[in-house]
Image (cartoon, helix red, strand yellow):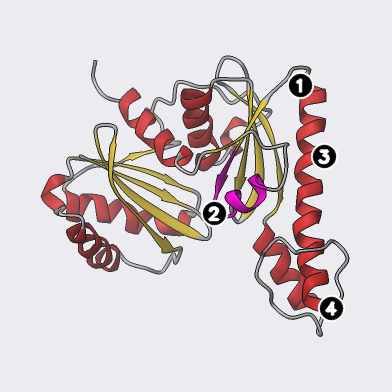
Amino acid sequence: MLLAIDSGNTNIVFAVYDGDERRGEWRSSADPSRTADEYAVWLTQLMALEGLTRDDISDTIIANVVPAAAYSLRALCRDYFTSEPLVVGEPGVELGVEALVDHPEEVGADRLVNTVGAYQRHGGPLIVIDFGTATTFDIIDDEGNYYGGVIAPGINLSLEALHVAAAKLPRIAVKQPERVIGKATVPAMQSGVFWGYIGLIESIVRRIAEEYGAEMKVVATGGLAPLFAEATEAIDQLDPELTMRGLLEIYRRNQPS
C-alpha cells in the first residue's frame, strides 16, 4: 500500500491507498517542530482504527511546501515505514508535465501535484482553484502542462489580518450571510469576506479564460471549496480528492514498467 503525504502551510494530509481504493485519510495541523516520532504515534493509532498497520505500507510519497517539515516527514517514512519516499520536485521524480513559466523552480510542489491530478481526472484546458492558506488559481493547458497561475491571500488569512489590524473587529468564522447588507459588525464582515471572494473568483476566472483564449473548465479543491462552489456558477466541479489523487498518479508514473 501507498502512504501519500501532502504537507501544506496550514494542514498536513496523510492518506493510504490500496491500488485505487483509499483506505483512510487523516488531517493534522501543520507544525514544523513536530518530530517523526510524534507523527508516527498519532498516525499509527489512526491507521489502527481502519485496520491498518505500519507493515501494510510498502511505499511513500511526499509533496511538501514547508522546508522546515521536510526532515521529520522523511524520517517518518524511513524509520517507521521502512520506505525511501518519493519527494515531488526532487531530481529524478518524473511528473510527466512541464511548468511553462519563467522560473519553473519556483512552482510549489502542491501546484504541480494539482496539475497532474486535475489533468488526469478532468482533462484540459482547466483552471484549478485551491482554497488553502493562499487561494491559488492554476492554469493547465490542453496537453496537461502547468501554464501559469494566480495567487491571492487565503480567506482565513484575510480574516486574521482584518482582526489584527482593526482593534474593534472580532475574529469571525467564514460563512455565507443571509444578506449582502450587514446590519451589525459580524454580518458585515462575513458579507465583505464571502461576497468579496466570490467577486474575486468570478473576475479572475473570467479574465484567465479571456487571456488564454479558450473555454476552460473550473475545478475547486481545498478545505473551503464546498462553501464557495455552491455560491457561484464560475466553478463547474468540486474535487476534494484532487491533490491526493495527483500524488497517487505521480507515484505510478515513477514505478518500473
Provide the residue designation for mark 2: 223
127 displayed left or right of 189: left
Provide the residue designation for mark 4: 184
Q: How many marks?
A: 4
Q: Amino acid at mark 3?
A: Ser
Secondary structure state at the residue bearing disc 4: loop
* Dot in front, 2 or 1: 2
The segment highlighted magenta reads 220-230
* Dot in front, 4 or 2: 4
Task: Specify which label sits upstream in the sequence, 3 or 1.
Answer: 3
- How crowded pointer 3 is (Cα within 10 Å; few <14, some 14-19, many 20+) is rated as few
Q: Amino acid at mark 2?
A: Gly
* Dot in front, 3 or 1: 3
Q: Residue furthest left?
A: 55
Provide the residue designation for mark 3: 203
Q: Residue 256's image quarter?
A: top left
Q: Are marks 1 and 4 in contact (CB under 8 Å)?
A: no
Q: Residue at x 63, y 20 (%)?
A: 125
Q: Amino acid at mark 4?
A: Ala
Task: Specify which label sits upstream in the sequence, 1 or 4.
Answer: 4
Residue 155, position as x, y percentages in the image: 68, 59
- How crowded pointer 2 is (Cα within 10 Å; few <14, some 14-19, many 20+) is rated as few
| Disc 2/disc 3 C-alpha distance (Å) | 21 Å
